[in-house]
Image (cartoon, helix red, strand yellow):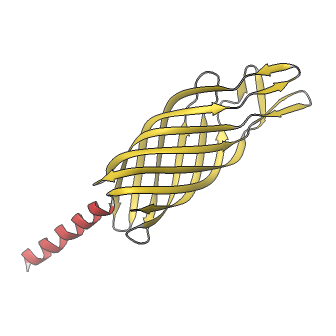
Amino acid sequence: MKKLLGLCLLSLIALQAYADTGPYIEGNLGYSYITNTVTDGISTQDSQHFGFNLNTGVMFFGFGADVGYSQYGAPIYNVGLTQETAYLNGIHLAFKTQQSIGPIFFLGKLGYGWLNEGGFEIYSREIPSRSGGGLYWAFGGGFQFTPNVYAQITYEQNQGDNGIPNVNMVMMGLGYTF
């Protein structure tokens, strides 16, 4: 009886490790916000936006690589009564870990993110588009509905450089493991 129970437990552990293995694709929607809201001495009026994120990667027994694209919205910069919009997006490459307890899983990502902010002109002052990279990290959790389909809630931060603000996003999404 003990051997049968041990074999069942070992099989359950092996199946859970297999669930965190394989290529995947996921899409997320959420709320993004900028933490440092001054660019070239010009402050933002609106630093909270709707955003989305698309990721793909591969996992091998709970560890893997993740690459993604995020659209963080369009911060509105203002001087006096004049306002201009600068679109903000980013890409990332990260190490990912994911561990499951039954159908519930927890994930973490750590890597490098690259942000792009569109240029704008305000009061005859040209603010050029710019790019910069920095630390990217994320954490979250989710629920595996089937061996292939899951839902998740994730928080991510992409740290800017070269005058680009840091961006945070809280999102919910769906994923598919192949």
Where residue 35 appears, as percent x and y from the top left, is: 64, 34
Please, which residue is most extreme toward the right here?
81
Above/below status of 66 relative to 129:
below
Residue 172 on image: x %, y %: 56, 58
Residue 98's x, y, as percent?
36, 53
Question: Which residue is nearer to you in this view: 84 or 157?
Answer: 84
Quadrant position of the N terminus in the picture: bottom left
Where is residue 7, by image quadrant? bottom left
Q: Is residue 9 above or below residue 117?
A: below
Where the C terminus falls, by quadrant? bottom left
Total numbered circles: 0
Residue 34 at x, y percent in the picture:
66, 37
Q: Please name whichever residue, 153 or 67, is drawn nearer the observer in this view of the structure.
A: 67
For the point 47% across and 56% down, the residue is 25
The quarter holding residue 41 reads: top right
Name the residue: 51% across, 45% down.
Answer: 68
The vertical placement of 84 against 102, above or below, is above
Q: Does 128 sit above or below residue 64? A: above
Q: Is residue 104 left or right of residue 15?
A: right
Question: As drawn, is 9 to the left or to the right of 142?
Answer: left
Residue most toward the bottom? 1
In this rendered view, identify the residue nearer to me: 133 or 159.
133
Please name the residue shown 83% across and 19% down the image: 125
Q: Residue at x 31, y 57 (%)?
A: 21
